[in-house]
Amino acid sequence: MKLSKRSSSLVATAIAAALVMTACGGSDDEGSEGESGAAGGTYSIALYSDPENPLVPSNTSESEGAQVLEALWTGLIQYAADGSVEYTGIAESIESEDSQTWTVTLNDGWTFHDGTPVTASSFVDAWNWAAYSENAQGASYFFSNIEGYGDLQAETDDAGNVVSPAIATEMSGLEVIDDQTFEVTLAAPFAQFPVTVGYNAFHPLPEGFFDDPEGYGALPIGTGPFKADEEFVPGQGITLSRYEDYAGPNPAQADTVEFRVYSDVDTAYLDVQGGNLDVSPDLPPDAIASAEDVFGDAFLEAPSSGFQYLGYPVYDERFSDPRVRQAFSMAIDREAISEAIFQGTKQPADSFVAPIVDGYREGACEYCELDPEAANALLDEAGFDRTQPIELWFNSGAGHDAWVQAAGNQIRDNLGVDYVLRGDLDFAQYLPLLADKGVTGPFRLGWSMDYPSPQNYLEPLYSAAAIPPNGSNRVFYVNEEFDALVQQGNSAESNEEAIEFYNQAEDILIEDMPSIPMFFDVEQAVHADTVSDVVIDVFGHIRTAEVSVN
């Protein structure tokens, strides 16, 4: 959540850079000089759940897995801590004369952790594999604007059963020119394409992956500053070691980083205080007020691209009427919850797009304002049955129970609709249930941008093409007019024109209210005095390579 709107334009800066730039834990270990010149030592970071899936870039679309991938992979481009684009990754340049056909040129010298070279085929083969529907990758949708994507999609019936197989396994819009160059042809112009490719769905894969995807998912081989020497152990975590042949300009400072799985954020926070954990990327709500006093300079607070929302199962008859969805949103006093639960550190959401990117409009969501009288009138118009409680869903162990319960109390008090809390599943169990239409009431989710664009808050969450298993549209919302406006924004010739279309698409969302925007986040973390140079970025990731062990 952003407490104030950034004055700079992340999207405009990123597009300009993409178009014109080229080449461009508690530990007793003493630091020792490694081959890379880094200081050495080991430190630990908390994860608050197991990753939902094995660590394959195109099937990792949740926070815990993405944090591990941040250490294991470097993509075509990288994002700075503020979200802007940096050409410090594998791409030397990404250029186009028409915003539709893009030539990607790679830097020399990049290798996978198994020592094999990163080539143009490493990207083209990975993207084709991710897009092919038979492989059921959760981020498949991100390739949908590449020419030929539809040929890789099997035809299914309403129950999801395949009735006609895909007619191709490779997209016609991808072509390897030579080892260091490949060409991407999009189905329509998309000026922001270079901004998107730092997202982990676009990361390369080594040749051996395709013979054993399951094995490589358990023991991933990436391109990043750290490498995996062991498999991820569910319920425990994984330890990564510095990759000495890393070709990027910012090698890992530590010898190893240990990711530890915690069942709840409270235990992780106490372990940092007790010297048993070095970094906790999140704080329990009841620790927010005192954390800075307790940790001093080791308390971190930074701008965030993230926001929290309550999604509706729009497939459920009780929530199929937009008037019902509008009413529940207007029954919630976000400001009161922020003050009571988060000591005012979370900004009440008034838009579907976070303030950190251009395209945010203050006060855009009229149904995000508390108005019990209007809410009750809408429920009456819709004929909603108030005698049956609603279920409120959230994942366990991450500190969401208090604010979801507070929202439930306000719904009960303002609308006369009782509720039942359903917060007994950890994140790795929770996400598949949502993807399988397994909930019958509003459910908590959060979203941090994958790349700096307002489009990333709209298309991946609400477009028809992003319905699971191909994307993150877990509310199962479908609106053809919304999809068309997003595509017009994607094809716009300028950032300003694109934002006009994205705003129009958001206006449709606001009327349909497939989810309830709740809070814009601020990133908060704490660390022990055993480590320094700890940075948490706008994506909510600890920048693992930068951390030094004292």
Image (cartoon, grey):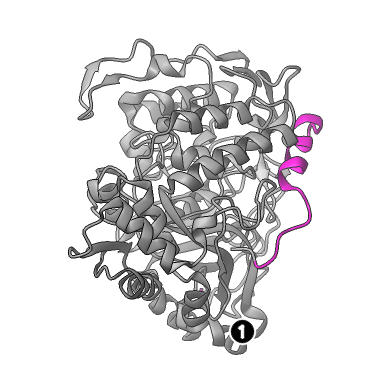
Considering only vertical position in the picture, is 251 above or below 390? Answer: above
Apparent side of residue 71 relative to residue 357 in the rendered image (left or right):
left
Apparent side of residue 425 relative to residue 404 in the rendered image (left or right):
left
The disc labelled 1 sits on which kind of residue? Glu
Q: Residue at x 66, y 21 (%)?
A: 180
Which quarter of the figure has residue 397? bottom left
Residue numbers of the magenta segment: 3-27
Apparent side of residue 228 relative to residue 76 in the rendered image (left or right):
left
Q: Residue at x 51, y 11 (%)?
A: 172
Query: What secondary structure is marked by label 1?
Result: helix
Query: Can you give x and y, in whole percent of width and height, for residue 396 in the image?
Result: 31, 67
Of 311 and 399, nearer the camera is 311
Whether the magenta-drawn stretch holds residue 10 is answered as yes
Of 378 and 349, nearer the camera is 378
Q: How many marks?
A: 1
Whether the magenta-drawn stretch holds residue 249 is answered as no
Query: Can you give x and y, in whole percent of width and height, for residue 431 in the image?
Result: 32, 51
Farthest residue toward the right?
20
Query: Can you give x and y, in whole percent of width and height, for residue 52 in the image?
Result: 34, 50
The quarter of the image holding the N terminus is bottom right
Considering only vertical position in the picture, is 352 above or below 497? Answer: below
